[in-house]
Image (cartoon, grey):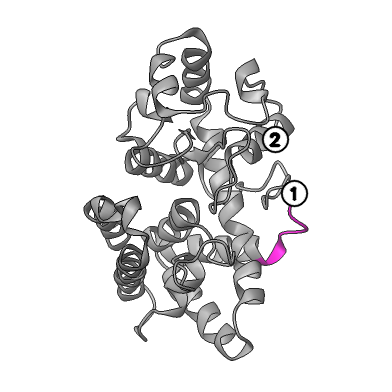
Amino acid sequence: MQARCLAALLLLSVASCGPAAPGGTSGSPSAASNLTAAQKSAIGKKIWQNECGGTVDGLTTWNAGEEFPSMGIGHFIWYPAGFNGRFEESFPQFIAFARQRGSQPPAVALQRHSPWTSKAQFQSAFRGPEMSSLRSWLANTVPLQTDFIIARSRGALPKILAAAPASDRGRIQNNYNKVASTPNGTYALIDYVNFKGEGTSAAERYNGQGWGLLQVLGNMKDVPAGQPAAAEFAASAKRMLGRRIDNSPPARGESRWREGWFNRCNTYARPL
């Protein structure tokens, strides 16, 4: 019963979302109100563990091989000025969301672009006052970050269905419903959009093949709703990420992320 109710609430909120606020999230204060506080807390903690190892230091990170820092429990991307990356930049979106909700980010977070332009510069400033104040604020706004991630996920399904071939839309919608029929499946849908995006952007492709939620749902095998669907979602996600690694430019060295990415996908198949 809990699983069916949680899935119904998620799907109701997707269907009832109005026009998205800038950055693809709902600006409504009730964007995440259909999940209980306990459910949201569990999802937020899992995402924080997935992205940051659950540590405060992990809330401000510059990953090896990347050209930008990542902030918060969802490792929201923040591009330095002049860098135009292929991935959706989400940290400025979160800051706008936080301000709409009445939070006051530290001054450094209000800058349009990351003030740190290289990993070396970022690391040298890691214990400085600006980044320390940013980490402190992020550590104190985990529920707000969770709301942002959930709102972003809820805005994804209409975009995915619009981007999919008309002949595939019914199957993608059905797969979404099947996965959402368990609490851990609901977590999987929420987490994966934050993790690897919607899959609708032509820029987020290697050799013309994407790896977002659209591709994961579209490449699921036909299985029953509930736990089998959550497990198949996890398996499909690993297939799409393995394909991404195989298609990626060798200079990016993405194979080093395979184990961590697959471990994260494995959490989708386990009870929340």
Q: Which disc, if any, is residue 96?
A: 2
Report the span colored magenta: 15-21
For marks 1 and 2 on the same chain, the one whose residue lies earlier in the sequence:
1
* Residue furthest left as drawn: 259
107 with respect to 129 (left or right): right
* Residue furthest right as drawn: 19
Circle 1 packing at 10 Å, graded few (<14), some (14-19), many (20+), is some
Q: Nearer the viewer, residue 197 or 62?
A: 62
Q: Quadrant of residue 42?
A: top left
**Residue 234, above or below 131:** below
Horizontal and vertical percent position of residue 162: 67, 75
Residue on which disc 1 sits: 21
Horizontal and vertical percent position of residue 13: 64, 60
Per the picture, the main secondary structure of the magenta-coloured stretch is: loop
Horizontal and vertical percent position of residue 116: 52, 24
* Residue furthest front as drawn: 251
Question: In which quadrant of the rendered image does the N terminus lie?
Answer: bottom left
User: Is 18 colored magenta in this rendering?
Assistant: yes
The CA distance from mark 1 to mark 2 is 9 Å
